[in-house]
Amino acid sequence: MNRLNFIELKELSFGYTSNKTIIKRLNLKISKDEVTSIVGSNGSGKTTLGKLMMGILKPTIGGVYILDEDVSQMSLALVGSKIGYLFQNPEKHFFTNTLEEELGFILKFKDVNELSIQQQIDELIEIFELNHLRKSSPLLLSQGEKQRLAIATILINKPEYLILDEPTTGLDIERKRELLNQLNQLREEGIGMTVISHDQFIIEELSQRVIKIHRGEIIDDQRN
Ligand SMILES: Nc1ncnc2c1ncn2[C@@H]1O[C@H](COP(=O)(O)OP(=O)(O)OP(=O)(O)O)[C@@H](O)[C@H]1O
């Protein structure tokens, strides 16, 4: 397997305040060819790590590199064109009145014509089985529908890689299976993924590599 490093962390350290280090000198290479799960107990630093990987948070020491490019030198929009980030709370993604508007929003700011916007919206609505909800308010959807819409809004930007923070929160086993199928389909299309999760089902079914974090340090790194 070609394990080209997609994301690399070098001596990465971070604290929200100067007196408490949350991420401690992490060194890690993440390949696009396998799904990587990041696991660990509450408060171990998983979400913080995900936000550092996206450049949403800035390291105190060390750095994050996407395909050898220093994330601190990249705009959030540029990082966002390469990596789609699913927030722990999918509602953080929504700010329009209907599901269709939500999906088309980003494309309106790019040089994309109306017909192409509509085609891309229709395609994602089909994949994520949201057709009956086109005119619904994103905030009124069920948890599973919100997760699917949030992932669809990320995919419309055509990222090469996804970082998914707790993608199965609030989903029953049937909805988890549906999401798993959709994520596996994306993998087959060549989209890489890191999944931050407590959910044993999604970790076991989706990932080939499991990294365990404890108090901001890697304490285990296993491949299936
Ligand atoms: N904005 C913030 N300001 C200050 N401290 C924070 C902030 N966000 C998180 N923390 C602290 O950083 C530590 C790591 O939090 P983080 O959310 O990264 O953990 P986590 O492993 O994702 O937890 P969980 O599994 O509960 O989501 C915790 O002690 C948390 O209280």
Image (spheres, grey):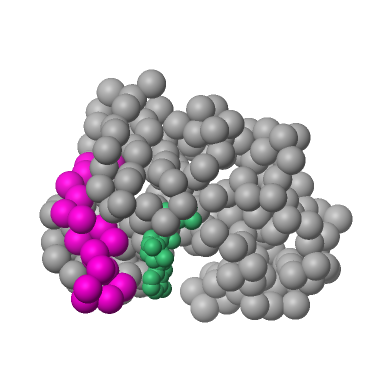
Which residue is nearer to you in this view: 39 or 164?
Answer: 39
Is 144 on the left or on the right of 162, as rendered?
right
The answer to whether residue 162 is visible is no
Which residue is nearer to you in this view: 37 or 217?
Answer: 217
Which residue is painted at 54% across and 59% down in the image?
Answer: 88
**Which quarter of the rendered picture does the C terminus lie within?**
top left
Question: Residue 7 location in percent, x, y?
Answer: 26, 49
The answer to whether residue 60 is visible is yes
Magenta-drawn segment: 13-31
Is 21 on the left or on the right of 113, as rendered?
left
Residue at the right extreme of this rendering: 132
Against 23, residue 190 (above or below) is above
**Which quarter of the rendered picture does the N terminus lie within?**
top left
Split into quadrants, the picture shows ligand 1 in the one at: bottom left
Give the number of callouts.
Answer: 0
Query: Is 25 a magenta residue?
Result: yes
Which residue is nearer to you in this view: 14 or 154?
Answer: 14
Query: Is 165 a magenta residue?
Result: no
Against 189, residue 117 (above or below) is below
Question: Residue 222 location in percent, x, y?
Answer: 32, 27
Question: Residue 89 location in percent, x, y?
Answer: 59, 63
Which residue is painted at 33% across and 44% down in the image?
Answer: 213
Against 85, residue 58 (above or below) is below
Question: Residue 138 location in percent, x, y?
Answer: 74, 68
Against 155, residue 104 (above or below) is below
Is 54 on the left or on the right of 29, as rendered?
right
Which residue is painted at 52% across and 61% down in the image?
Answer: 87
**Image quadrant where residue 178 sits:** top right
Is 26 on the left or on the right of 150, as rendered?
left
Which residue is painted at 46% across and 59% down in the image?
Answer: 85
